[in-house]
Amino acid sequence: MDREQQLCGGAVLRQARPGDEAQIVACIRALAEYEKEPDAVQMTAGDLRQALFASSPSVFAHVIEKEQRIVTSSTSPPAPPGTAAATSPRTCPQAGTTRPNG
């Protein structure tokens, strides 16, 4: 998906872009805390920036943004040509949701 998609309630679904890394990592950390594994996340915003925006990305991400805050993210590895990659959604409890997706 290369364009933004308007969702209900003023939310927008879009590809992650530079500058989103810290909020995406916050979503991932919130999910780890919810799952009682707060030490499982070793990734930094810099690590994610490199993975997402290097010349050969090792992961892709989409986010749902509302009122200029990322409220959920979904990451997936690059898919082999002609196939679809499974996504791993991350919901940010601090953004007002009560449970992570997935």
Image: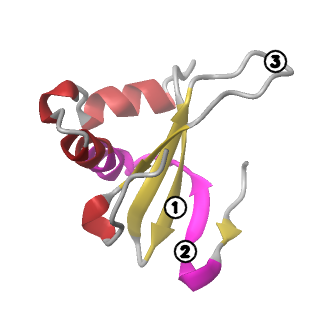
Question: Residue 41: percent from the left, percent from the top?
Answer: 22, 29
Amino acid type at image mark 2: Ala
Q: Secondary structure at mark 1?
A: strand
Q: Which residue is mark 2?
A: 11
User: Which residue appears farthest toward the right when viewing the image?
Assistant: 82
Q: Nearer the viewer, residue 83 or 15?
A: 83
Who comes first in sequence, dot 3 or dot 1?
A: 1
Q: Residues under labels 2 and 3: Cα distance?
A: 30 Å
User: Which residue appears farthest toward the left when viewing the image?
Assistant: 39
Who comes first in sequence, dot 1 or dot 2?
A: 2
Q: Locate residue 60: give its quadrant.
A: top right
Q: Residues within 10 Å of mark 1 (few under 14, many from 20)?
A: many
Residue at (52, 20) in percent of width and height: 58
Amino acid type at image mark 3: Pro
CB-based contact (under 8 Å), mark 1 and mark 2: yes
Q: Is residue 6 above or below residue 86?
A: below
Magenta range = 8-27
Q: Which residue is mark 1?
A: 64
Residue at (44, 56) in percent of width and height: 72
Question: Residue 3: percent from the left, percent from the top?
Answer: 72, 58
CB-based contact (under 8 Å), mark 2 and mark 3: no
Numbered label attached to residue 81: 3
Amino acid type at image mark 1: Ile
